[in-house]
Structures are given as C-alpha cells and as structure tokens.
Image (spheres, rainbow, N blue to C red):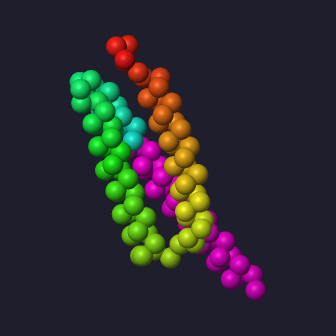
Amino acid sequence: PGIPGRIVQSDIAFSILLGILLAGANIALGYFQLRKAMRAPQSRFVGAVLGGMGLRMIGVLGSMILVFLLVPVHAVAFAVSFLVVAAIGLLVEVQMMLRSQRPDD
C-alpha cells in the first residue's frame, strides 16, 4: 500500500516541477524579449512586444500539447502549477513594463 502512494506523490511532484519549469521558461523569454523591445525605436515597440507575446503563446501551447501527449503527467497538478507561476510572471512582466516606460511616453 505504501509504494503506490509514493508513486502518485512523485508523479504529482514531477508534474508540478514540469509546470513550473515551462512557465519559468516563458517568463525568461518574456524578460529578454521585453529588454530587446525596449531598445527598439518607439514606432516598433508595440509590434515587438505583441509579436513576441504571440510567439511565446504559440510556443507554450505547443509545449503543453507535447507534454500532455508524450509525458505521463498529473494533468491538474501540471496545469495549476503552470498557471500560478505564469500569472505571477505576467504580473512581474507588467510591473517591469510600467517601471521602464520611456520618458517621451
């Protein structure tokens, strides 16, 4: 009886870790993309931010589909951990954008 419980717990822990890693990769890409967009001319800033965000969303969606198809994860643990970390990352990203607004805005 003890072994199946440990297997389930390790599956949940692995799923949570995988969700955190995927969201963390998305946050890191967002950070570098925002820094690059901040160096772009004002006329290209919005396009760079929105284009980068769209590409990241497509990449995350594709990665999540691959995880669900190829990796035996606990779906709820993976999805919830991803969503929590991604939401925190989104808040940090918005805060970074607000703090780094250009003086001519």
* Residue under the image location 41 percent in, 21 percent down: 101
Q: Residue furthest right?
A: 1
Q: Is residue 1 left or right of residue 47?
A: right
- Image quarter where the C terminus lies is top left
Residue 90, compared with residue 17, is above or below; it is above
Q: Is residue 6 left or right of residue 97?
A: right
Magenta residue span: 1-29
* Residue under the image location 45 percent in, 45 percent down: 27
Q: Nearer the viewer, residue 43 or 16?
A: 43
How many numbered marks does the figure carry? 0
Q: In this orientation, does residue 14 appear?
A: no
Residue 85, horizontal then vertical, whole percent: 55, 49
In the rendered image, residue 18 lying in the magenta stretch gets the answer yes
Magenta-highlighted stretch: main secondary structure? helix
* Residue under the image location 48 percent in, 34 percent down: 94
Q: Nearer the viewer, residue 40 or 22?
A: 40
Residue 45, horizontal then vertical, whole percent: 29, 30
* Quadrant hosting residue 5: bottom right
* Residue under the image location 31 percent in, 33 percent down: 46
In the rendered image, residue 96 lying in the magenta stretch gets the answer no
Q: Is residue 12 left or right of residue 20?
A: right
Residue 3, horizontal then vertical, whole percent: 70, 82
Q: In this orientation, does residue 22 appear?
A: yes
Residue 72, compared with residue 54, is above or below; it is below
* Quadrant hosting residue 13: bottom right
